[in-house]
Image (tube, helix red, strand yellow):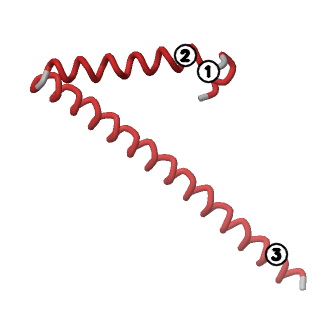
Amino acid sequence: MERLLQYLDDLDDLFAAIGLLAERIRSALWLLFSAVVIFVVVAAGILLALAEPPLALATAIMLFVTLLYRSVTVPAGRLRRI
């Protein structure tokens, strides 16, 4: 009976190790996905600035105004956590 419990404990440890490995893989994939999305957004912004400078300026101003509005309307403690 004690051997069975030891095997079950080893099996539990194996599944926990697989779960930790899967979490590392998920974290790395999320980081890679975020980096690719940021790169694509930056590249799109550069291409927009080269192709249509007035439209790129209007987009940048809208984003800047949105950030200013958010920094004024959101309480200071909540803004840091986001």
Quadrant that contains the N terminus: bottom right
Residue annotated with mark 1? 74
C-alpha separation, residue under disc 1 versus residue under disc 2: 6 Å
Q: In the rendered structure, which amino acid carries the disc numbered 2?
A: Ser
Residue shown at 41% from the left, 16% from the top = 65
Residue shown at 61% from the left, 21% from the top = 74
> 2 and 65: which one is in front?
65
* CB within 8 Å, label 1 to label 2: yes
Residue shown at 16% from the left, 22% from the top = 49
Residue annotated with mark 3? 6
Residue shown at 38% from the left, 45% from the top = 33
> Viewer-nearest of labels 3 and 2?
2
Q: In the rendered structure, which amino acid carries the disc numbered 3?
A: Gln
Q: Residues within 10 Å of mark 1 (few under 14, many from 20)?
A: few
> Viewer-nearest of labels 1 and 3?
1
Q: Is residue 2 left or right of residue 67?
A: right
C-alpha separation, residue under disc 3 versus residue under disc 2: 56 Å
Find residue 9 and report its horizontal and vertical position in percent.
79, 71
SS for tag 3?
helix
C-alpha separation, residue under disc 1 versus residue under disc 3: 54 Å
Q: How many marks?
A: 3
Q: Residue furthest left?
A: 51
- In this rendering, the answer to whether 41 lies above or below 54 is below
Residue annotated with mark 2? 71
> 50 and 22: which one is in front?
50
Q: In the rendered structure, which amino acid carries the disc numbered 1?
A: Val
SS for tag 2?
helix
Q: Residues within 10 Å of mark 3 (few under 14, many from 20)?
A: few
Quadrant that contains the C terminus: top right
SS for tag 1?
loop
* CB within 8 Å, label 3 to label 2: no
